[in-house]
Image (cartoon, grey):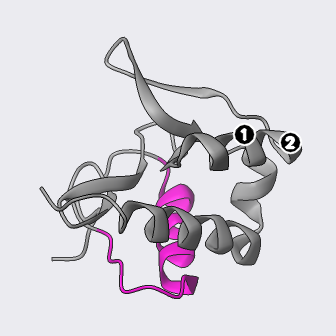
Amino acid sequence: MPGGSDYQGPATALERYREVVAASSGDAEVKGAKNPYTSRNGHMFSFLDRDGTMALRLSAELIEEYGENHSAEPVIQYGSVMRGYVAIDEELFEDVPALAGWFDRSHEWIGTLDPK
C-alpha cells in the first residue's frame, strides 16, 4: 500500500508531498498510512501533518539558511516542539523543484547520522 493511503488531511497536500518526494534525487519513499513520512536509516526526516503542512528535518546550519528566505516556523506536534524540524511555508510548498532541493539536502544530512 502506498504511503498516505489512510491520510485524513487535504488530498491536494498529500499529492504535492508525493510529487516532492518523487522529484527528489534520492531513493526516499512515502511511508505511513495515516501519517505520511519519509525516513533514512531509521531517522524520519520529513512528514505531512493532518492539516496539510509539510515538515523537514534539517541541521542547525540548514535551518538558519532556510530562515534567510522562508518562514522557519517551529513544528509543534501533540503539544511539543519537534527540534530540528521546520514547517514548510505555503510558497515553497507550491514550488516542487525548489522544495525537492531542500528535501534532497535534508535526505543528505540525515544520511550523516548513525543508523538507528
In the image, the segment drawn in magenta is 10-30
Q: Which residue lies furthest to the top in this view?
A: 79
Q: Residue at x 70, y 34 (%)?
A: 72
Majority secondary structure of magenta residues: helix
Q: Residue at x 28, y 49 (%)?
A: 35
Task: Tell me whether the residue at label 1 lies in contact with that at label 2, contact meaning CB atoms closer than 8 angstroms.
Answer: yes
Residue 16 visible in the shown view: no
Classify 83 as above or below 96: above
Dividing the picture into quadrants, the one containing residue 107 is bottom left
Report the side of 41 relative to 116 (left or right).
right
Indicate the position of residue 70 as horizontal and vertical percent values. 81, 43
Q: Does the magenta stretch include residue 21?
A: yes
| Residue under label 1 | 64
Q: Which residue is drawn at 54% across and 56% down?
A: 13
* Quadrant for the C terminus in the image: bottom left
Classify 97 as above or below 87: below
Indicate the position of residue 60 as horizontal and vertical percent values. 58, 40
Q: Residue furthest right?
A: 69
Say what secondary structure mark 2 lies in.
helix
Classify 84 as above or below 65: above
